[in-house]
Amino acid sequence: MSERMNRSDAGLRGSRGVKTRPGPSLDDFAASGRPLPRDVKTAVAIMRAGIGRKLSLAEVAAACGVAERTLHKHFCAFLGLPPLAYWRQLRLTAARAALLGGGENASVTAIAARCGFHHFGRFSVQYRRAFGEAPSATLARGRTAERSCTRRLRDHMEAYTSAARLTPSRREQPSIAVLPPVCAAEPTHRFFADCIAEGIAAALSTIRSMSVVVPRSVQRIAAQDPQQLARTVGARYVLAGRIAQAGVRMRVIMRLLDATSDEHVWGDSFDGSSHDLLALQDRVTDGVVRAILPGIRGVEIRRAQRKRSQDLDAYDLALRAFPFLLASNPDATRRALDLLDQAMRIDPDYALASALAAWCHAQLVVHHGTQSPSEERRSALALIQRAAILDADDPQVLTARCAVHTIIGEVDVARDLIGRALALDPTCGWAWERSGWLKTYIGEPDAGIADFSRAIRLDPSSTSNANRFVGIGSAHFDAGRYGQAAFWMRKAMLEQPGTAWVNRTLSVSYARLGERLAALDALDALRRFCPDVTIGQVVASIPFRPDFLDRVADGLDDLGLPP
């Protein structure tokens, strides 16, 4: 056992930096097409439930029904760490969560012991190596944050989190208190207000990235201070409103507030008739759910960007990475990948970090950001399979998996994944964007344009709009509408100048329109962006239908790009 522990220590030490990415042994599994190993899923569940226990590799392997060597091989391939090193990292993450929330009476030694670390000197060394600070420094920061909370909110959060203190940190997710709109005293109005609140809460509760609270018997208090009520119940955001009526005409005014900063995030009004309250309720529910989630995502990203680097957890790092990931240019993608590597080091159990990192590797292939496309594809496939093991039902993880499987040409898998993502969260603009790309790649340009347009309507201020404009342009190119293709691709580059890779198709669009000078200018811009690019590299990087690729190749050849 000591030999195995030494081996796991080596794996943990190797997990620092970019070495958290799974090793090359995954190739054997990927090439064989075999499903993800069930023993890894079982072992991860055992480890999550056994944070404070003593576990041996033999015990875990026996529970999984495989040999120790097989379990070790599968963990290294799919999760990037040996089993015991992975389990130790989970325990370190749990210890960090307990230190941050330990309060005045907590001690480093007691928390370390509860998380299974009984050699405190070794624990301190491993903790500093993993998180860049001593356990006592983390505890001190947690106490400082604790003192700044109000007593009522602290009591609520203590009761809420006490059962989870010895489990790996589940990433902080937005929570929202949905209040019935303030209305007149008529029973009909009150009942209608309750129906609106419960309908919105029911719609939001289907979205896994959102925690929803519906406080009861709070109408009068909410009217006075909805932010204070949200803080009392432990919610970060509060959705409140008002109902007004003039004759048969009714108006429902809704607003979303950030309870931590009193910031107004979103607001809108909805009109209807008192003769058809159900139709008005449906309009309010649909409008609120579609509008508030992009607003909340934007606030969450800005909150993460304002945090000090030493206070960032895996969730914060993933939020910081998102704008870079959606910018669709290689430099931004590399910055996103650096942040996601940090997130995976802090919390190897975080599926979204692995999924987004996989999409980063795939983007480097599509956007000519790598000299080793095959290596980037292998890294993308390894990370996306790791994410599938860790969380098979998160809409954003499913969306990232769809994107990677689309790029490697597994269209049927991608279609199933994006269908599941949209069923779980139909308000996700990124999922509709990836659905648009999938349909465009397989030769359904008009359906692709419809999905891109829907993504823009859902999230009109997104960093990803440039990529959506490129998608619309590519769909028009596929349909032979080269004037429209050129218009949307130019619009994408005005929106995001870093998307110079668009010139590979824009130049051909100009050539098809007979604008040869504009075509040559676009090709020169492509060469400045990627000096050594060839026709073969362009064709190999994008998974369009043969007819689309043939037109691109013929056009680039006519303009003088090397084969």
Image (cartoon, helix red, strand yellow):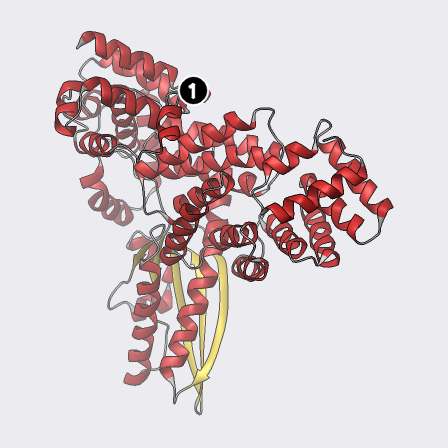
Residue 206 visible = yes
Q: Please name the residue that numbered disc 1 is placed on.
A: 19
Residue 307 in sight: no
Q: Estimate the x, y position of residue 562 in percent, counting from the top left.
A: 75, 30
Q: Total marks drawn?
A: 1
Q: Is residue 44 left or right of residue 20?
A: left
Q: Is residue 295 left or right of residue 1?
A: right
In this picture, is 227 found above or below 324? Answer: below
Quadrant containing the C terminus in the rendered view: top right
Q: Nearer the viewer, residue 83 or 153?
A: 83
Question: Where is residue 106, by image quadrant?
Answer: top left
Q: Is residue 322 above or below residue 80?
A: below
Residue 91's image quarter? top left
Looking at this view, name the residue that lies furthest to the top. 3
Q: Could you say which is closer to the camera, residue 99 or residue 340?
A: 340
Amino acid type assigned to the residue bearing label 1 in the image: Lys
Expressed as whole percent of the image width and height from the top left, the position of residue 427 reads: 44, 59
Vertical comparison of 428 with 23: above or below: below
> Is residue 121 left or right of 531 when viewed as pictured?
left
503 to 275, vertically: above or below: above
> x%, y% of residue 130?
36, 20
The quadrant in which the N terminus is found is top left
**Residue at the spot x=75%, y=50% of the render?**
509
Question: In terms of image quadrants, where is residue 476?
Answer: bottom right
